[in-house]
Amino acid sequence: MTRSVNAVTHNTRSLHQRVLFEDTARKRGFTIVSPERLGLREQVELFDAAGTICGEYGSGLHASMFSRPGTLVMAARDDTADLGFLQSGIDQELDHHNGYVIGAASPDGDGRFSVDPADLDLAFDWIDWGGPAKATV
C-alpha cells in the first residue's frame, strides 16, 4: 500500500525512502495500491482478498480490519514517543500476524521519517519466511 502525497489525504507522516520501499516491494512480488483512490467497495474487496499487506502506518493500513484471519500485516513507522500501536490492536482482535519496521523520525518534527534500507530488507525477509501469499502493498 502506498500513501499518496496530495492535499486531499492530509498526510502528516512521510517515509523518506518511499521509492525504495515501493521498489523493494515490487521486486518481492507485491502490487502497489493507493486505497484512497478506490471506492469503499473496492477497498473492502482488496483487503478481504489480501494475504499480506504492508505499507506506511496509518488509516490506510488500518483498513486491514476487512482482512481475513491469518493475514500478515507489516507497517513502516517512525520512532516517536507516542507510537500508538492501533494496528497491533486491530490485528490481535482479527487474528492477523503483524510486525513493524521502525525508522527514525526527522529531528525537525516535520512528520518525515527514515528507515535503514537493511531494515527494509529484513522486514521483507520476515514476510517471505512466514507470510501467506503476497497480495498488496
Image (spheres, rainbow, N blue to C red):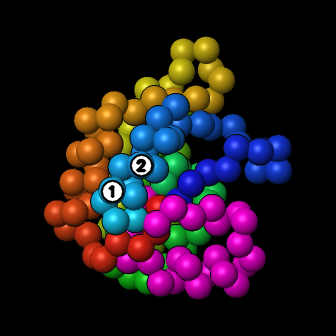
* Residue 81 visible to an observer of this rendering: no
Q: Are marks 2 and 1 in contact (CB under 8 Å)?
A: yes
Residue kind at label 1, given as amino acid type:
Lys
Which residue does the numbered mark 2 point to in the structure image? 23
Percent x, y of residue 29: 34, 65
Percent x, y of residue 4: 67, 50
Q: Secondary structure at mark 2?
A: helix
Residue kind at label 2, given as amino acid type:
Asp
Callout 2 environment at 10 Å: few (<14), some (14 to 19), or many (20+)?
few
* Residue 25 visible to an observer of this rendering: yes
Which residue does the numbered mark 1 point to in the structure image? 27
Q: Residue furthest top?
A: 108
Q: What span is in magenta?
A: 31-54
Q: Is residue 100 above or below residue 16?
A: below
In the image, residue 39 lies in the stretch drawn in magenta: yes
| Residue found 51% across the figure and 61% down from its top | 32
Q: Quadrant of residue 125?
A: bottom left
Percent x, y of residue 7: 82, 44
| Residue found 52% across the figure and 50% down from its top | 57
Please indicate whether residue 128 sits to the left or right of residue 35 in the image. Answer: left
Give the alpha-carbon distance from disc 2 to disc 1, as whole Å.
Answer: 6 Å
The number of numbered badges drawn on the structure is 2
| Residue found 62% across the figure and 37% down from its top | 13
